[in-house]
Amino acid sequence: MTLDHLSLLARLQAGFLAAVPRADPDARVPACGDWTVRELVEHLAGVHYWAAGQARAKRGAPLGDGPFDLEAHYAAQAATLRQALAELDPDATGRVLTHPKPMGPGPVRFWHRRQTHETLVHLHDLRAAIAGTGSIGLAEAEPEVWADTVDEVVTVLQPRQAGLGRMAPLRLQVALVATDVDGSPTWVLGAPGERADEVTPDVVVSGPAEGLALTLWRRLTPAEAGLTVQGDHADLEAALAEPIVP
């Protein structure tokens, strides 16, 4: 499945915006430490604004410290991002996440994908805050979209975390199998440059792509995500305890 990240981004932003007025701004966001809904919304709005600037390879003026009208503030920054990505050639050169330097030149299309997944995970967070707990199915997206989220963690985010020195290379290799996607794609966390069928993993985790993604992003435990674990659960917990995502 070839994903249209810009259409997905618009759809997910609309879902996030619609949920903002339903949430108590002071409510805690499950699995996100001490974050409140207000902090979550302001964070995603700020990331959208920042990413738009990175795509244009220029720094925007500071947004200010608030307090903001959350619905209006998020709507404005979501639109800023969409406008920037719509105007720019996807193959044009902007600034993207890299390593060993945190940022470097790269194609604008990087932000199509990165902001889609940033919004998807935080849509889950916002709806978890409204529900009072996280669970599968809060942020509606096709299994292929969640599988792309897994792929981004394994091939982009975790290697960057290691490349920036934020974590040591993983001692264990964890195979991740998306059972609800055609062909049951497999990734190996800790071996992003190797073919999955050429690696002997220490642990194999299988289940729905959404469950894999939310487990990697530490929003749900493997049990909460409905995943099956083959191997030592303590080894899996040790790998997941590492800062594999920013």
Image (cartoon, rainbow, N blue to C red):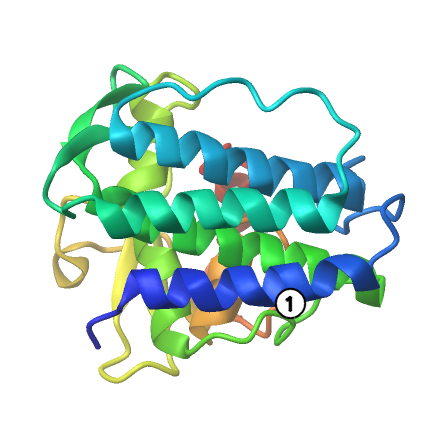
Q: Residues within 10 Å of mark 1 (few under 14, many from 20)?
A: few
Snapshot quadrant of residue 184: bottom left
Q: Nearer the viewer, residue 119 or 1?
A: 119
Q: Is residue 131 left or right of residue 106?
A: right
Q: Quadrant of the N terminus?
A: bottom left
Q: Amino acid at mark 1?
A: Ala
Q: How many marks?
A: 1
What element does badge 1 sit on? Answer: loop
Residue 4: x, y in percent?
27, 68
Q: Look at mark 1 in the image and give the residue it sits on.
A: 223
Q: Residue at x 85, y 62 (%)?
A: 132
Residue 240: x, y in percent?
52, 44
Q: Is residue 10 left or right of residue 237?
A: left
Q: Residue at x 30, y 56 (%)?
A: 151
| 209 relative to 194, above or below | below
Q: Nearer the viewer, residue 107 or 239?
A: 107
The answer to whether residue 206 shows anywhere in this view is yes
Q: Residue at x 19, y 59 (%)?
A: 196
Residue 61: x, y in percent?
48, 18
Q: Is residue 177 left or right of residue 105?
A: right
Q: Residue at x 79, y 60 (%)?
A: 21
| 31 relative to 130, above or below | above
Residue 215: x, y in percent?
55, 56
Q: Is residue 35 left or right of residue 141?
A: right
Snapshot quadrant of residue 9: bottom left
